Amino acid sequence: MKNQYKSDNLLGFQETKPVFVKTPFAAFGKQWKPGEEFNWMVQPCKEDDWDRIRKRIQQFYKLGKIHHDSAREVEQKVGDRLGELNTEKLQSLVRQVNAVVKKRTTTSKEFQDKRLKQSKIEGKQRGLIRAWLNRNPWASEEFYEIRDALLNDTKPKED
């Protein structure tokens, strides 16, 4: 646990937690505005530049350009990236997750009880997905593989 804490604070802030823009700046070819989530970890970069980028983010944090904001993390549901999926991709995610659920259940009643429900309203669908994922942690590995494939417009790998 002590090593994890040391790793989390190696740069003076927790790298795995989202940071938000406090004062405007330009980075990754974009102008970042106050209040925006600064999702630096998912920005495209060369592997050789990773350490340099981490140091630059550390400077942003020390200069007060970015900060952690627990309230905003909860408010914006940061981390699950469901906000990046449009209606079509959300429906595809539900269909693919339900196919996994169907394989793992033995009766149609069990499937109906455990399946991920569907909605045509994007915001409601995201809420249904989040609630379902919280109730079914056993499915998280497959869920994130499917979600990542949809985010990257690729097919999830088969067993």
Image: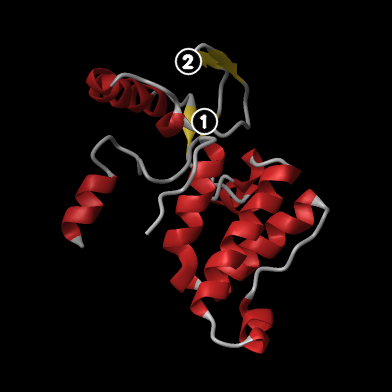
Residue 96 in which image quadrant: bottom right
Q: Percent from the top left, x then y, of residue 13?
A: 34, 40
Would you say residue 38 is visible in this rendering?
yes
**Mark 1 — residue?**
38
Q: Residue at x 41, y 23 (%)?
A: 60
**Mark 2 — residue?**
27
Viewed as shown, does residue 86 lie left or right of 58? right
Q: Which quarter of the rendering shows the C terminus?
A: bottom left
Q: Amino acid at mark 1?
A: Phe
The reply to whether the C-beta atoms of the residues labelled 1 and 2 are less than 8 Å apart is yes
| Foreground residue among 124 and 56 | 124
Q: Earlier in the sequence, mark 1 or mark 2?
A: 2
Q: Is residue 85 above or below residue 94?
A: above
Viewed as shown, does residue 57 lie left or right of 125? left
Q: Amino acid at mark 2?
A: Ala
Q: Percent from the top left, x then y, of residue 156?
A: 46, 48
Q: Percent from the top left, x then y, of residue 111?
A: 63, 80
Q: Residue at x 64, y 68 (%)?
A: 131
Q: Percent from the top left, x then y, of residue 95?
A: 65, 59
Between the C-alphas of marks 1 and 2, the distance is: 10 Å
Would you say residue 79 is visible in this rendering?
no
Q: Is residue 49 above or below residue 97?
A: above
Q: Residue at x 66, y 68 (%)?
A: 116
